[in-house]
Amino acid sequence: MNKKITFPELIEAVAATTETSKRTSEMFLKELFAVVSEALVKGENVKIKNFGVFKLTEVGERKSVNVNTGEEMKIPSHTKVSFSPDKSLADAINMPFSSFEAVELSDNITEDDLIKMTSPDLPDENNADISPIEEDVNGINKPKDTEVHIQTGVADVDKSEVASDSNETHGTEIEADTRMSESDAAEHDNVGMVAPCGVSEPLETAKEEVRQNNAVEPNKENNEEKSVSSQGKSVPEEDSLDEIRRQLENRYVSPYKSALFFKGYFWGAVTMLLLSAVAFYSYYLYNEENKAYEEAVDFALRNQAPQVSEEIVKVEDNKAEIMMEPDSAAHEATNNLHADDDEESEVSVRDVQKDVARYDTVSRSRYLTTMSREYYGDFRFWVYIYEENKSKIDNPNSIAPGTVVEIPPASKYGIDKNDRESIEKAKKMAVSILNEHK
Amino acid sequence: MDNKALTEILAKRLNRKPEDIEKLLEAFIATVKNRCGDLDSVAIPGFGTFEAKKRLERVSINPATGKRMLIPPKVTLSFKPSALLKNKLR
């Protein structure tokens, strides 16, 4: 299958079938094609029995366009070799398809029908339904037609039932018919409204009783409605079959489409609701956190003596900073609060008593940077805390949890979070410290 | 050049009997038939390629009668001359 047989393989095959040496078959094949091409060059046609004919054909001069440059160019006249296989060879190669024969097509078969024929997944009922519609469109005035239609449509139903059903529909149909003949075109719509109910309802019930072919039923109903409504438009053209089919297809698809549409709406609403719920909840949580923080600060402030106003300012600074970056800072602060709510207030109390020398404990969620941010307003000043506690801390990147560190007063190292130089200095120090402990 | 002339020339060149040449020629044809029947292609260096091609079914109209015919799908043997042969013929 789709393999390329090379010359050596061909030689082998020929040698095997003729029971000669590979050498002879190679010589033979080489000579064969040499002779053939020589003859062709001489301008002779070559015919090989049971194989075919190599023909030479003259190709006249023609104009062409170079694809790359877009330039026009002339292709000079030349001879071309073409090969037409012998009938026996062609038939042998066409073996798998030899059973097919060219078929004459009748005039009323369209391309659509051919496609339908080749795709078996289309239900047969569709085809069966379409033809009666044509009859309906052209001759709804004849109730006999509709009767036949119904009977063919519900072939499986008990005969008696069919008889009663068809009689019923027959009656309504005649009624409609007479009315239609009396009235003018303006009343066509009314007729259209009446007729589908009369026809489809008994049909449907009968079908429900006998076979539960769900897929076909709505289709059928649609067909019938369509046939009548198209009639109601009072355009009974002869070639309306195609139009009806198109409309049918539209009809058949549209409920799906609308269902999808509404589904999309529904899911959109649900996601909106969910999103708003999440947003509200997170806002609520945030408020709670803030409140907790404020309470803690209040508690701390209440315990402070009036002479340490500096401390108050600091705490308030902290708070202000946290307010400024509620995302990270508030979160961190609250984390700490939750973790060691009591400790926080204790610390501030201690601060108050000792005025300058403060202590803090390193924990899993509380690093030098956290403290620095808390006490000095910027995490970069952690270097001074390290500097102060060098004796206790070996490596600033891995401090054992529980280590108590002394927090130097801001004035000792000239810490000022609003001063750019001070921050730069801290940064440089950090670099050198980290280099030491690489 | 017909089949007889071809076999005679080949017999003379290869110093073999024309019957042997006939046999070899038949073997070659049988090989091409078998391989192309399996939709393979047979390449001959310096000459060209014989390959089987699938043709789809189609509707054709007989210009004389105006009748439409459904032509069934089929496999045909086609020959593609090599560039060398093409240049020689130019």
Image: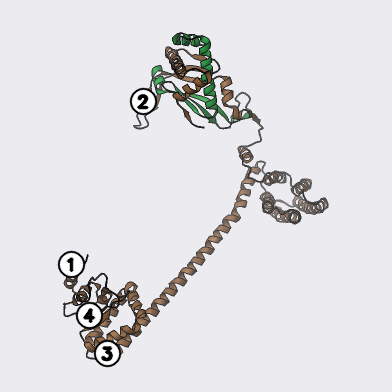
Chain colours: A brown, B green
Mark 1 = which residue?
A432
Numbered mark located on residue A73 in the image: 2
Q: Nearer the viewer, residue B89 or A37?
A: A37
First in residue order: circle 1 vs circle 4: 4
Q: Position of residue A254 (x, y in %)?
A: 59, 54
Residue at 83% across, 52% down? A160
Residues at marks 1 and 2 on the same chain: yes
First in residue order: circle 1 vs circle 3: 3
The kind of residue tagged 1 is Ser
Q: Secondary structure at mark 1?
A: helix
Q: Secondary structure at mark 3?
A: loop
The kind of residue tagged 2 is Met
Numbered mark located on residue A407 in the image: 4
Q: Position of residue A146 (x, y in %)?
A: 76, 48
Q: Quadrant of residue B90?
A: top left
The kind of residue tagged 3 is Gln
Mark 3 = which residue?
A304
